[in-house]
Image (cartoon, helix red, strand yellow):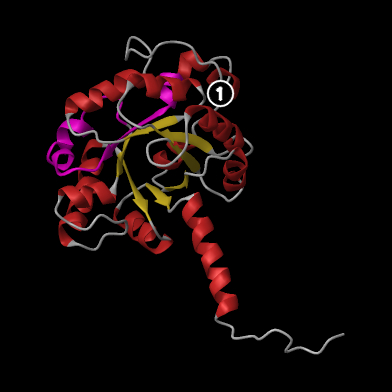
Amino acid sequence: MRANTLRDIWKRGDAAINGWLSIPSSFASEVMSHQGFDSLTVDMQHGVVDYQVAVTMLQGIAAKDVVPLARVPWNDPAWIMKILDAGAYGVICPMINTRQDAEALVGACKYAPRGFRSFGPVRASLYAGADYAQHANDTLVVMPMIETAEAVKNLDDILSVPGVDAVYVGPSDLSLTLGCTPKLDQTEAPVVEAQHRIVEACKKHGVVAGIHNATAAYARKMVEIGYQFVTLASDSRFLAMKAAEEVNAVRKSGVKAGTLPAY
């Protein structure tokens, strides 16, 4: 079975750089796959990506040796199993607040006897290899999102569930539930404290801590405190930021039409 290189990165103690795909396009995904990310996540929760487009995006990611992940819309076995069958090598799942939530997520990601995932890896076996069934349970990554005050309260219970490989901090929702402004790259004390508490709990339980970031500078700070999976913005944000930067550069130049001599 094709290796999941995220596990190798984490085993070395290094941090993986993840890209976020919100543009429903196989070509955009292919472009992102050439930019040096360790993994790319198809976002099926927020935004406009449906299942059939997600499959083509996974195919676009396969242009390079980048680990394909997906964030599912909810802790729903139907969504989880279907995107794994499409070839996702890991699932990020929102709003995991209790041990029971985490156990249900793991169960949906694992074949028997470790879970209740139904067998039918229609594209996964093409992407991963003919021995997919024998190795999927140990290769795919299960990553619940920690994004509420309730989840932080139940951290030890969630992190001690067998099969939870990593957790993913959603700063905006976490901020809301802690009475703060919903945003990435948080500086408000309650959220910063929670982010530190999460990474320390992950170290204790041998689970990888991941977090969504708006900027490279903040992602570096998160790596420094122990996060081993950091997402940089998203494809749509990169597009918007760079386009705005170039437009503004021309507008602010003050250059007037016809100021150079004609040839």
Q: Residue at x 58, y 31 (%)?
A: 56
Residue 158 placed where, x, y %? 20, 32
* Quadrant the N terminus occupies: top right
Closer-to-camera residue (8/158): 158
Q: Secondary structure at mark 1?
A: helix
Residue 10 placed where, x, y %? 40, 41
> What's the residue type where badge 1 is placed?
Ala
Q: As displayed, is residue 10 above or below residue 185?
A: above
Q: Residue at x 57, y 76 (%)?
A: 249
Residue 256 placed where, x, y %? 66, 86
Q: Residue furthest front?
A: 257
Residues in magenta? 136-164
Question: Would residue 56 be visible to someone looking at this image?
Answer: yes
Residue assigned mark 1 = 128
Residue 88 placed where, x, y %? 48, 29
Question: Would residue 88 be visible to someone looking at this image?
Answer: no
| Left or right side of 64 for 98 | left
Q: As displayed, is residue 113 above or below residue 142?
A: above
* Quadrant the C terminus occupies: bottom right
